[in-house]
Image (cartoon, rainbow, N blue to C red):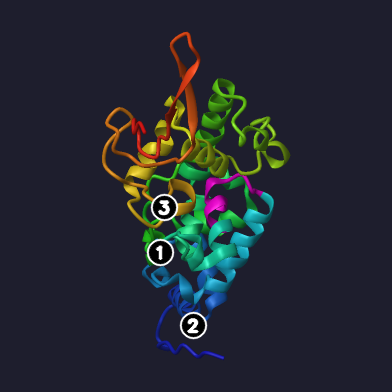
Amino acid sequence: VFFCPMGRSLGRSVVAAVLLAASCQCTPMLRASSCLTDPSQSLCANADDFYTTTAVNQDLLAICSTYTWLSGCSVWKQCNTLGIASGISTSYCAPWSLLNSTCSLVLGGNTAAIPACRTYLSLCTTNTKVAQCAVEGVPGLVSTDVALSDVQLLCQEMPDMVQCPECTDITSPADKCPDPFNTLSGICLSMWMSNCDHWEAMCRIHQTGFRPFCGENSGSTGGASSGAVCYGSMIMYFHTGFNGTPSRCKPVCYGSMI
């Protein structure tokens, strides 16, 4: 039990206000309620006092067990399954970073409709004092909506890519495109195509620390026409001339002919 003393000479309305403020300072549950309503208060600075790491992880589990197609959930799954062995930077596997990558309206789409994202969205407003809201998600992460759209375009262009059966209908992602970001990364790691532009822009940011999605050499400088960016190791055969003699191309780096 916490006791928050106050002066006896205060008026009744002032006493009530002081009591409310004092109770928020003294009781984590009341502070959480107050901060969810108005996170611009200085008492909301440390979310660990009222939205613990355990609670954050429980929300992430609830989100990604149901909304598997969110880009942030692709990252969460790798972090949660493999940990440091995943090849993802530990900073991106931190709970608040994953929460940002998963629940952000920019990255996740209509995450306001996801119950377990509501605490994050209520706390992380433009005028928030919650320090944890400044924890960065994955920089440049391809948003869920863009990942869905790009996979659709790539599989229309190259329907025989082995990853395309993973995503057959982007309007029903729960069962027909459950992990579009991972599918997009698999396609673009195998063979770069024009609709890999969003993925490429993301991977340029990550020289290390995002291996499952950007490959071993992700983030190298260069471009699709420069022969300097290393993404896939798919062996392709191009037939040249009329004699059908194949030339072998292994695009470990763009344009690298061997």
Residue at point 49%, 58% (across, down): 98
* Circle 3 residues within 10 Å: few <14, some 14–19, many ≥20: many
Write the residue at 56% across / 24% down: 158
Q: What residue type is labelled 2?
A: Cys
Marks 2 and 1, how far apart at CA: 31 Å
Marked residue nearer the N-terminal end (3 or 2): 2
Residue 91 shows which numbered tag? 1
Q: Which of marks 2 and 1 is nearer the N terminus?
A: 2
Q: Give residue 208's quadrant in the image.
A: bottom left
- Which mark is in front, 2 or 1? 1
Of residue 21 and residue 170, the one placed in the foreground of this image is: 170
Mark 3: amino acid: Val
Dominant secondary structure of the residues highlighted in magenta in the image: helix
- The residue to which callout 3 is attached is 138
Say few, some or many: other residues with alpha carbon within 10 Å of mark 1 (under 14 / 14 to 19 / 20 or more).
Answer: some
Magenta segment boundaries in residue numbering:
67-76
